[in-house]
Amino acid sequence: MKKTPFTEKHIALGAKMAEFAGYNMPISYGGINDEHATVRTNAGIFDVSHMGEFIIKGAQALDLIQRVTTNDASRLIAGKAQYSCLTNEHGGIVDDLIVYCLEENNSYMIVVNASNIQKDWEWISRFNTNNAEMQNISDRTCLLAIQGPNATKILQPLTELDIMNLKYYTFVRGVFAGVKNVIISATGYTGSGGVEIYFEDKDDNADRIWSAIMSAGTPRGLKPIGLGARDTLRLEMGYCLYGNDIDDTTSPLEAGLGWITKFMKNFNACELLEKQKAEGVTRKLVGIEMIDKGIPRHDYEIKDASDITIGRITSGTQAPSLGKAVALGYVENGFSAIDTTVYVKIRDKSLRGKVVKIPFV
């Protein structure tokens, strides 16, 4: 398994470690529920250095991004970021990602999922017919996510950059904890606020930044958080996880991502998706809250009152913030309306749930 620059720190802190996307990653430290509550009420630090980062630059950079992603990157100016996705020729999602505008029309950073780094690199390269400059900087980039309502208050003394007033999906660049050329962005995967910090893995950068954050944060209740709580936090917000809720066979329109699918430009599968929008999708990703006691899990069947299969669960958990079991799943369009009763097959029993509005919290 690959290591991040922080792997030994996780082990020293007693983290339960496991393989994720080829990396030895911390799943939990003191327990998922406690870590989840820490992020919702205070602040936590996640090591997400396994994520992938590509630089696309030059006169043809924007043209390439516009052709391979669904959102309209021409609206980006320096210091702004955008959620988007790559689509294949069938309208399926190759990956979901974030585009950062480093220099308007000329230089961008694309952040992709760890499990898709090679796939995404090859996919984007395939469409780079006008020779935009591409760099895969994944192996030399560190990424820490400091999430929670008190995250920026804890971090502000470590930089002269104004991070407490960062608007959602914007970023600043500068010195942080004595390290130069750090990107601090108001993004994240928890729904509790905070920032993500990108910096180059060279010299003692990783040690300096980790130690500075822990020194500033530990007295104020900041804790290291593992991927287990990252999953429960994102699921409470209804955020999709690639490989579970979205993949090469699900379209952005089916997944409720029509808001990042812009038809005023020509991107891969644009015509197919525009037709799908006009005709309507046959299935939709919905939020489900369980009425009966039971926890839905990935790939469990969703049934109607006549025990006919109408869909499948893609992600499910006992939501720590709610004390209820919730899930995401695709259902036939006729069963996607809010408050529709559905049944989830759990251990040979069909247990009641209802379609609810996302986010769950």
Image: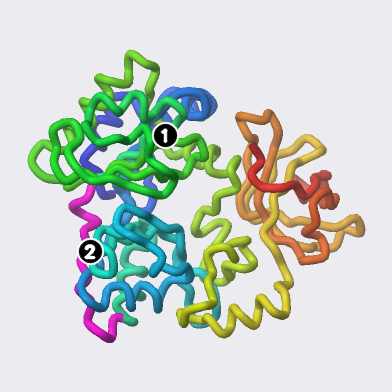
Residue bearing the label numbered 2: 136
Q: Say which of 204 and 179 sits in front.
A: 179
Q: Amino acid at mark 2?
A: Asn
The image quarter containing residue 82 is: bottom left
* Span of residues in magenta: 128-141
Indicate the secondary structure of the residue bearing disc 1: strand
* Identity, as a three-letter code, of the amino acid under mark 1: Gln
Whole-angstrom CA distance, mark 2 to mark 1, is 26 Å
Q: Which numbered dot is residue 103? A: none
Residue 152 higher or lower than 92, as above or below: above
Say which residue appears at 38% left-offset and 36% top-offset. Answer: 165
Label 2, secondary structure: give it: strand
CB under 8 Å between callouts 2 and 1?
no
Q: Residues within 10 Å of mark 2 (few under 14, many from 20)?
A: some
Examine the structure image and report whether residue 135 is included in the region drawn in magenta: yes
- Tally the marks: 2
Q: Is residue 105 left or right of residue 94?
A: left
> Which corner quadrant of the image does residue 75 belong to?
bottom left
Q: Mark 1 or mark 2, which is nearer the start of the sequence?
A: 2
Q: Residue most toward the left?
A: 203
Residue 135 image offset from top left, x and y in percent:
20, 66
Q: Picture coordinates of residue 195 (x, y %)?
A: 37, 39
Which residue was labeled with disc 1?
147
The answer to whether 172 is drawn above or below residue 161 in the figure is below
Q: Quadrant of the C terminus?
A: top right
Residue 262 in sight here = yes
Name the front one of labels 2 and 1: 1
Question: x, y percentage for residue 39?
Answer: 47, 29
